Image (cartoon, rainbow, N blue to C red):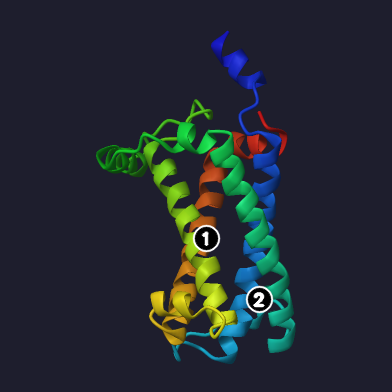
Amino acid sequence: MQKQTQTHQTIQPLWLRVTHWINALAILIMATSGWQIYNASPIFKTLTFPSAVTLGGWLGGAIQWHFAAMWLLAANFIVYLSMNIATGRLRRRMFPLHLKRVFGDAYAALRGKLGHDDLTHYNAVQKAAYLAVILDLSIVILSGLVVWKSVQFPLLRTLMGGYDNARVVHFFGMSFLVAFFVVHVAMVALVPRSLLTMIRGR
């Protein structure tokens, strides 16, 4: 009876599903166009990205894609975070979070013994990962503002350690998002029911 009730209840509300997929699309566009922009002036001379995984075709085209996705990501992230706070979902699903529990769940996951039966609750590793992504998205947006309009945001530029350092922060911030995306897709493959909840809500 409990399993049947859980199957029919809404696990992921509509606003969360919409913002989740918009975030995924915006990050995909920003990452691939960002790699094309990066190739025009690499931070690390030995690292460039093959054209097969970049978007835009050339620097100007990549910048247009990047700016378009930038506004989409920033606006959608504000809606996502605001709704999470306003509905109390952030507090209910992400807290409490204990460091000892994070390591315990991570160890269980590595041994293949971390359960995923109840999708209405996040384990400690999921909580830590989602909170890290929220923080990282904030850093990506702020460092992106410095890279885009360095003169107009002097305080942000100073906090980032200057323009060149802001580029490094932005690069590693986006790299973290891409790494999270890859792990997230892998976890969905292991627990395909989680994909259904993000499509139909339950």
User: Could one spot residue 77 in this view of the protein?
Assistant: yes
For residue 174, above or below residue 2: below
- Quadrant of residue 39 in the image? bottom right
Residue type beneath disc 2: Ser
Question: How far across and down, in percent of the image, does residue 89 sit?
Answer: 53, 34
Which residue sits at x=55%, y=11%? 2
Name the outermost residue toward the left: 100
Which residue sits at x=41%, y=82%? 165
Answer few, some or many: residues within 10 Å of disc 1's Cα (few below 14, many 20 plus, some between 14 and 19): many
Question: How far across and down, in percent of the image, does residue 176 sit?
Answer: 46, 64
- Depth check: give the residue in front, 176 or 163: 163
Question: How far across and down, in percent of the image, does residue 148 sit?
Answer: 59, 80
Which residue sits at x=37%, y=41%? 109
In the picture provided, is 10 more to the left or to the right than 153?
right
Upstream in sequence: badge 1 or badge 2:
2
Residue located beneath label 2 in the image = 33
Q: Residue 79: which disc?
A: none
Element assignment for label 1: helix
Residue located beneath label 1 in the image = 137
Which residue sits at x=69%, y=81%? 63
- Depth check: give the residue in front, 119 or 71: 71
- Depth check: give the residue in front, 78 or 30: 78
Residue type beneath disc 1: Leu
Element assignment for label 2: helix
